[in-house]
Image (cartoon, rainbow, N blue to C red):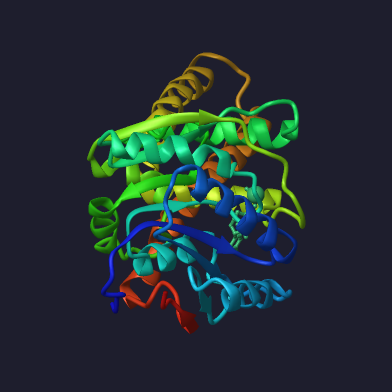
Amino acid sequence: MEQNSKHIELSVVIPTCNEEGNIRPMYEQLCLVMEQVHITDFEFIFVDDGSTDQSLLHVRSLRVKDSRVKFIQLSRNFGHQNALKAGLDHATGAAVISMDADLQHPPALIPTLVEKWKQGFEVVYTIRRDDQKVPLLKKWTSKGFYRITNKLSEIPMEEGTADFRLLDRKVVEALRQFNETHLFLRGIIPSLGFKQMGIPYTPNARVSGQTKYSFSKMLRFALNGITSSSAKPLYFSIYAGLFFALLAFLYGLYAVYIAAFTSEAITGWTSIIASILFIGGIQLIMIGIVGIYLGKLFIQSKNRPLYLITEKELKS
Ligand code: UDP
Ligand code: MG
């Protein structure tokens, strides 16, 4: 991995997918904040994740005037997490902040992140405090996701933590060793150790454009998150199997009793069909869970790169 030789104080990594309306406001707000924290030695790295709009054109035009604006253009859409990884791999700052391009992650929080970093914290993450502006469905699904994930995984993830955080160079270097596919940084970072600190914030509304996370995409993201940080779902089938085997045994006793001591034999067709269907359903779910892990192993076994770069402009 090539690196700029000069060490920069602060990098801001911004995964960008069709955010043409947000790039300029983002740049302007970031510049204001950099003035506030008296950092002139910074870089903003926009990672263009296969945008089909004018996003990259806007970034290029900013770069003409300010070479601290840098970019990496991925060869296609690799997804938010991989775009983020590309940015982290190429950032040179002593501290690296990652945030969304749509200004939902308020740049005004950056001074606090930097202050905590200067106090010695190596991971300064943020905790989203939702207010009324967030759609109820998103709020509930997000709550449910963190609750389930935390039940299942060994290392708890705080509710509302997103990919808006500051990482010290040490942590960024540690992350370089994580080249797993289906990357899920939210689950990895709490498990790294280091001195961590969380800061609450209220998200802004998206400035321009639309969210890239539909309900089905969020569901996939959640399933990916759970199966990335925990192998516990694989054990479900054992517990479920034991449970149903016990039920079947009891029901068997009952059937024997009916046949031996009553004249009501050959009833119970309904219960047989019902239990076959029910157990069949459970089996399908369990096979599905195993399938998810198997699929991940399959993809991982190919050991393909997480992202491919078309072009990059990273010189200061
Ligand atoms: N993003 C990306 N690749 C994708 C989807 C999203 O780089 O495939 C970026 C997007 O441009 C934004 C951030 O990831 O900067 C978060 O996406 P979005 O705002 O759509 O998600 P939400 O905030 O609605 O959860
Ligand atoms: Mg957003």
The residue at 29%/75% (across/down) is: 3
Q: Quadrant of residue 155?
A: top left
Residue 302 found in image quarter = bottom left
Of all residues, the one furthest to the bottom in this rendering is 310
The one nearer the camera, 58 or 165, is 58
* 138 to the left or right of 117: right
Q: Is residue 189 visible?
A: yes
Q: Is residue 312 left or right of residue 280?
A: left
Q: Residue at x 68, y 71 (%)?
A: 55
Which quarter of the rendered picture does the C terminus lie within?
bottom left
The answer to whether 178 appears left or right of 233 in the picture is: left
Tell me what residue is drawn at x 55 percent, y 71 percent: 66
User: Does residue 196 sit above or below 62 in this rendering?
Assistant: above
Task: Name the residue: 56% across, 15% down.
Answer: 262
Q: Looking at the picture, tell me which residue is in the foreground, 47 or 41.
A: 41
Q: Position of residue 279 (x, y in %)?
A: 53, 40
Frontmost residue, 259 versus 174:
174
Residue 281's spot in the image, x, y percent? 57, 44
Q: Is residue 183 above or below residue 192?
A: below
The answer to which of 253 and 236 lies nearer the viewer is: 236
Q: How many marks?
A: 0
Q: Quadrant of the N terminus?
A: bottom left
Residue 101, above or below 68: above
Note whether residue 297 is visible: no
Q: Position of residue 19 (x, y in %)?
A: 69, 63
Residue 218 image offset from top left, x and y in percent: 62, 49
Single out the residue that lies furthest toward the top. 261
